[in-house]
Amino acid sequence: MVSKEKRKFFFLLLLTIADSSIFFNIIIGTHLYIWLVWQAGRVTQASLATLLSFLLYPSLILMFIGLYKWRDDKWLVGRHYNKDSARLVSIYLIASQIVIFAFDIIVGILYSWTVGCILLFLHCSFLLLLASLVVWVCK
């Protein structure tokens, strides 16, 4: 079993890596270079894949931090959960889903309404499944 101090250290390390401005600038610069130089600034399936990788990285980091914090608090939900911790976990998890939702909308606007609606439907189905799982765990 990992000690509480060690878990706090790992959580703070994750936050530091995620908030690192140098790393964030490298990610932005790399994706901008790929889109402008390699893909000539056109909106194609390849450029949407570049956009997905650009948006998916911060989304996964936010989701991982939220789940790690939730795990650190022993997966408590509902009235048994500390309000400050619940606020942090919900901010991280909701922010990660907003980023993915933005990608769904961008695909619908720039590429194809059909593909955007399908992605949106799959995303909403996943969120409904996740919400059902949380309700099931609460009971």
Image (cartoon, helix red, strand yellow):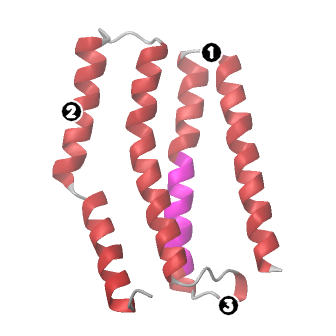
* Mark 2 touches mark 3? (CB < 8 Å): no
What range of the chain is rendered magenta? 86-98
The numbered mark, 2 or 1, whose residue comes first in the sequence reads: 2
Reply yes or no: does residue 91 show up in magenta: yes
Q: Given the current orientation, which residue lies at the most extreme left position?
A: 22
Q: Quadrant of residue 26?
A: top left
Q: Position of residue 53 (x, y in %)?
A: 41, 34
- Tell me: 52 left or right of 26: right
| Mark 1 or mark 3: whose residue is earlier in sequence | 3
Q: From the image, which quarter does the C terminus lie in?
A: bottom right
| Cα gap from disc 2 to disc 1, whole angstroms | 27 Å
Q: Is residue 17 above or below residue 49?
A: below
> Badge 2: few (under 14), some or many (20 or more) residues near its Cα, within 10 Å?
few
For residue 29, the mark is: 2
Classed neighbour count for the residue bearing mark 3: other residues with Cα under 10 Å, few (<14), some (14–19), many (≥20)? few
The answer to which of 21 and 109 lies nearer the viewer is 21
Q: Pinpoint residue 104: horizontal percent, then vertical percent.
A: 59, 32
**Amino acid of disc 2:** Gly
Q: Report the residue marked by disc 3.
A: 80
Circle number at residue 112: 1
- In three-dimensional space, the C-alpha distance between marks 1 and 3, rounded to whole angstroms, equals 44 Å
Q: CA distance from mark 2 to mark 3?
A: 43 Å
Residue shown at the point (21%, 49%) measured from the top left: 23
In this rendering, the answer to whether 107 lies above or below 18 is: above
